[in-house]
Image (tube, rainbow, N blue to C red):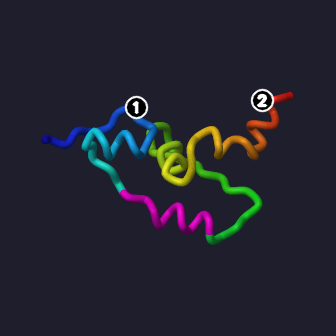
Amino acid sequence: MKKGIPLGIMNYRELKEKNYYVVDKSLLIQEFLERMAKATLVTRPRRFGKTLNMSRRCPPMACLQNSSISQRIQK
């Protein structure tokens, strides 16, 4: 099966199941977790994989449950 380029896919599991090219950024995620900072600012252009990297760590809604974004949405 020929590998494709994942455009608009933000779920790691889907990338693997549908045989798309994937850049492994596990070490980047590990570095974020080891720093244990109160806040982390990720400044990258659109379509750079920010959401995809978070989906590798936890399901999207679970990540948002304790975030300040989630708290603002609920108010």
Amino acid type of the residue that numbered disc 2 sits on in the rendered structure: Ile
52 within the magenta span: no
State left or right for residue 23 relative to residue 56.
Answer: left
Identity of the residue drawn at 44% across and 40% down: 11
Q: Which mark is residue 50?
A: none
Identity of the residue drawn at 66% across and 53% down: 41
Amino acid type of the residue that numbered disc 1 sits on in the rendered structure: Gly
Q: Which residues are magenta?
A: 24-33
Q: Main secondary structure of the magenta part?
A: helix
Tag 2 residue? 73
State left or right for residue 14 relative to residue 31.
Answer: left
Question: Residue 75 placed where, x, y %?
Answer: 86, 28
Tag 1 residue? 8
State left or right for residue 4 relative to residue 24.
Answer: left
Q: Quadrant of residue 1?
A: top left
- Sort mark 1 into few (<14), some (14-19) or many (20+) by Cα contacts within 10 Å: few
Q: Secondary structure at mark 2?
A: helix
Question: In the figure, 58 relative to 74: above or below?
Answer: below
Question: Residue 69 placed where, x, y %?
Answer: 74, 38
State left or right for residue 29 relative to residue 16.
Answer: right
Identity of the residue drawn at 52% across and 43% down: 51
Q: Quadrant of residue 32?
A: bottom right
Q: Secondary structure at mark 1?
A: loop
